[in-house]
Amino acid sequence: MTPQKDHLPFLDQLRGLAIIFVVAYHALFQAFRRDQLEWHGWFRDFDAPASFLAVYPVTWGWSGVAIFFAISGFCIHLSYSNSRNVNTTDFLIRRWFRIYPPYLVALIFFAFLFPHSRVDLHTKYGIAEFFSHLFLLHNLDPRSVHGINVAWWSIAVEFQLYLLYPLLLAGVRRFGWRTMTLFTAVVEIGMRITDGLCALTNHTPFPAYWIDSPFYFWFSWSAGAVVAEAYIKKTPYPFDSKHLPLWIVLAIAADLFKPLSYFSFTFVALGTATALVGFLQRDGAPLRLSRAASANLCLAGLCSYSLYLIHQPIEEAVPGLAVKLWPALSHQPTVLFLVVLSSWLVIFPVAWLMYRRIEMSATALGKAVVHFRRTLSSGRVQASIS
């Protein structure tokens, strides 16, 4: 099997688009105090202020998370397959260093230093909230899932999906990719159907340990891994790039029709996996953009993890400060939305610095730890032989 490139330029572009979607989506809520149209029965209610309808496309910014999940599945499997000489433990160690140190730095800053998100450790709730975040378990507790930094629920889910990855591989070795992909689909779709039926009949959503568990997103994440497997083995792709418009239509329709809305995330993830196929069939050629647009999008993609870690608390602090300086903004949500978006001018340089100084250093440290483990293990083998 010939190793494939694990850095493809279009991935940075897609990550860049995804983080821009997410940042804009969270800015929308800060300005309008809502990020979706309300439901009127089983359909979206378009009887909303004209100012909100003018920025309605931004309500789709949540799709950036689904894009991230599918790309993550693709990249994790591609990276692991290109590192066959690295065992699963070493691979997970490298992933831990890639994800956790930047997260820990952000957690300490926002939990203890940033006024808007500071945790009160004098209460049992504050202590529980901090430690649930420290161990990346906050997505399973309704009291902490949206604490400190709302966006971090997906960081915990991603980390838990990494822990499920060896289980997925074990299943693949025993049953094959087709069976395991079907299994993850049954798990995720079954959970979403159950959640939807409960909400539609009892108007009571399932708790966080259900709707924010990694199993709720397992198929959406695995779809990217299946594409990576086909790319690696040079076998037919599981998705036809010609069907991308279909997934887009399904995602839009699902978001507008309440009984199907629980599958909109899955449809976006499948659309992303289909888009990945399209890029790979074009030999990984990136989006055709101007040189400046492509460069800036790739820069955003490179530091998208740091951007994701820090953007929301900063955005949450902007409206209060802006309204204090300009009280009229409290009655001009569209202008306030643009003001919150302008916080990108602060968020991006900080995220870029965080990427260069923390993410890259942590990644290098992870590689060094794995190298040390392998050297130590090799030394022990040599000693036992002699």
Image (cartoon, rainbow, N blue to C red):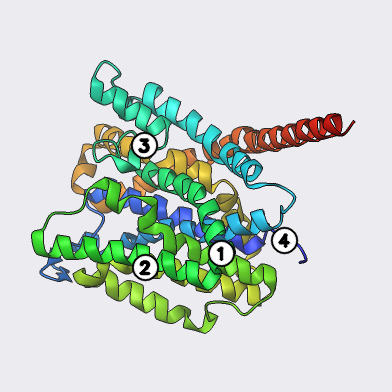
Q: Are marks 4 and 2 in contact (CB under 8 Å)?
A: no
Q: Position of residue 207 (x, y in %)?
A: 22, 48
Residue drawn at 24 percent across, 25 percent down: 125
**Local SS, label 2:** helix
Nearer to us: label 1 or label 3: 1
Real-space Cα separation, disc 3 to disc 2, in angstroms = 36 Å
Question: How far is mark 1 from mark 3, CA to CA?
Answer: 44 Å
Q: Which residue is mark 4?
A: 5
Residue 297 visible, this angle:
yes
Q: Residue at x 69, y 75 (%)?
A: 234
Of circles 4 and 2, which is in front?
2
User: In front here: 167 or 285?
Assistant: 167
- Whichever of labels 1 and 2 marks the residue nearer the N terminus, that label is 1
Position of 152 relative to 12 (above/below): above
What residue sits right under mark 1 in the picture?
174
The answer to which of 377 and 16 lies nearer the viewer is 377
Residue wearing tag 3 = 313
Residue sitting at the far top: 122
SS at badge 3: helix
Amino acid at the residue labelled 4 = Lys
Point 40% across, 68% down: residue? 185
Q: Residues within 10 Å of mark 3 (few under 14, many from 20)?
A: some
61 vs 9, left or right, is left
- Secondary structure, mark 4, is loop
Q: Which mark is residue 186?
A: 2
The amino acid beneath tag 2 is: Val
Q: Amino acid at mark 1?
A: Arg
The answer for how far apart the CA atoms under marks 4 and 3 are is 35 Å
Determine crowd level at label 1: few under 14, some 14-19, many 20+ residues with C-alpha closer than 10 A. Answer: few
Amino acid type, callout 3: Pro
